[in-house]
């Protein structure tokens, strides 16, 4: 099993704290932790598995904080969460046969589109609006679809969930953030279970990073609940654009190769 020095572990712990803070507000924690684990020398599959382990603590702590603050209807979200959990297991297990190159090419475009939606959509605040689809239909379609994506690939899942909760479920930004963390936690459990089953998890590193994730997530969720959409909206746009740039910088991105860059 891959191991790291104390110095590298401390740096990974710092990265996990920042990722937990950012992820609790606008998603995108993997933008920090996955590159950090790869730079620390972890093989790609083990980096993904370890990231799922440490991310469980952050999403779980954030989901708990939002639920305790009264922003999550756990009973209403149980079915979507359970379906996201099952779908993420399937996604992780079939990840090796999915066209990962196609996903890498599409992701920057989709993330930029999400960012533009939140930039130009007027009257986005913390007040709920009319639902465009029923909660049952949302739970049977959007939740498992994004759970499948989270298990198979991952980056941007929180941003896509936020977009779905705001544009389809009619939720305000704070409530959408809270429910995003709940579903993201459920899908992380499924993805982690699949990676753990094949032995692609560094337990010591993941658990130490997980403790830092809890601290960062609790602070981030507290900030979001106090400041609402005034904090969530700009950080969400920034995270989407940063993740899009990070994916475009990947030398293997097929979108860049297709235009000759």
Image (spheres, rainbow, N blue to C red):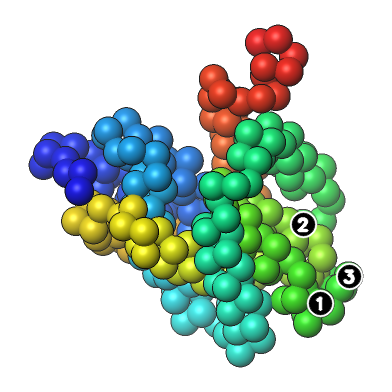
Vertical relation: 186 (above or below) 101: below
Q: Which mark is residue 137?
A: 1
Look at the image and tell me whether residue 203 can be seen: yes
- Residue at image location 70% in from the left, 24% down from the top: 255
In the rendered image, which quarter contains the C terminus? top right
Mark 3 or mark 1: whose residue is earlier in sequence: 3
Mark 3 or mark 2: whose residue is earlier in sequence: 2
In space, the residues marked 3 and 1 are separated at their CA atoms by: 10 Å
- Residue at image location 57% in from the left, 37% down from the top: 243
| Furthest residue in direction bottom, as rendered | 75
Mark 2 or mark 1: whose residue is earlier in sequence: 2
Q: Position of residue 158 (x, y in %)?
A: 59, 55
Residue placed most toward the observer, 141 or 182: 141
- Residue at image location 36% in from the left, 59% down from the top: 198
Which label lies toward us, 3 or 2?
3
Q: Residues within 10 Å of mark 1 (few under 14, many from 20)?
A: few
Q: Which residue is mark 2?
A: 124
In space, the residues marked 3 and 2 are separated at their CA atoms by: 16 Å
Q: Position of residue 25 (x, y in %)?
A: 52, 56
Q: Which residue is mark 3?
A: 132
Which label lies toward us, 3 or 1?
1
Per the image, label 2 sits on a secondary structure element best described as: loop
In space, the residues marked 2 and 1 are separated at their CA atoms by: 23 Å
Residue placed most toward the observer, 47 or 18: 47
- Residue at image location 32% in from the left, 31% down from the top: 39
Which label lies toward us, 2 or 1?
1
| Furthest residue in direction top, as rendered | 260
Number of labels in the image equals 3
Q: Position of residue 103 (x, y in %)?
A: 66, 40
């Amino acid at each position: 099993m891959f191991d790291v020095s104390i110095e590298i572990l401390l740096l990974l712990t710092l990265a996990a704290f920042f990722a937990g803070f950012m992820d609790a507000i606008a998603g995108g924690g993997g933008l920090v932790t996955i590159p950090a684990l790869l730079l620390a020398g972890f093989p790609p599959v083990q980096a993904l598995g370890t990231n799922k382990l440490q991310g469980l603590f952050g999403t779980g702590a954030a989901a708990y904080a939002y639920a305790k603050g009264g922003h999550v209807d756990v009973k209403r979200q149980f079915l979507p969460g359970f379906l996201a959990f099952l779908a993420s297991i399937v996604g992780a297990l079939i990840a090796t046969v999915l066209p990962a190159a196609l996903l890498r090419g599409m992701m920057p475009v989709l993330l930029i589109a999400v960012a533009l939606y939140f930039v130009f959509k007027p009257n986005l605040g913390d007040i709920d609006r009319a639902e465009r689809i029923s909660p049952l239909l949302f739970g049977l379609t959007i939740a498992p679809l994004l759970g499948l994506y989270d298990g198979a690939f991952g980056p941007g899942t929180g941003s896509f969930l936020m977009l779905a909760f705001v544009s389809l479920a009619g939720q305000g930004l704070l409530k959408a953030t809270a429910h995003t963390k709940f579903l993201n936690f459920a899908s992380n459990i499924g993805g982690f279970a699949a990676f753990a089953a094949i032995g692609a998890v560094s337990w010591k590193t993941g658990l130490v990073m997980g403790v830092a994730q809890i601290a960062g997530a609790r602070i981030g969720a507290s900030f979001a609940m106090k400041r609402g959409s005034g904090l969530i909206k700009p950080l969400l746009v920034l995270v989407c654009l940063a993740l899009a740039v990070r994916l475009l910088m990947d030398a293997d991105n097929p979108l860049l190769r297709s235009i000759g860059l």
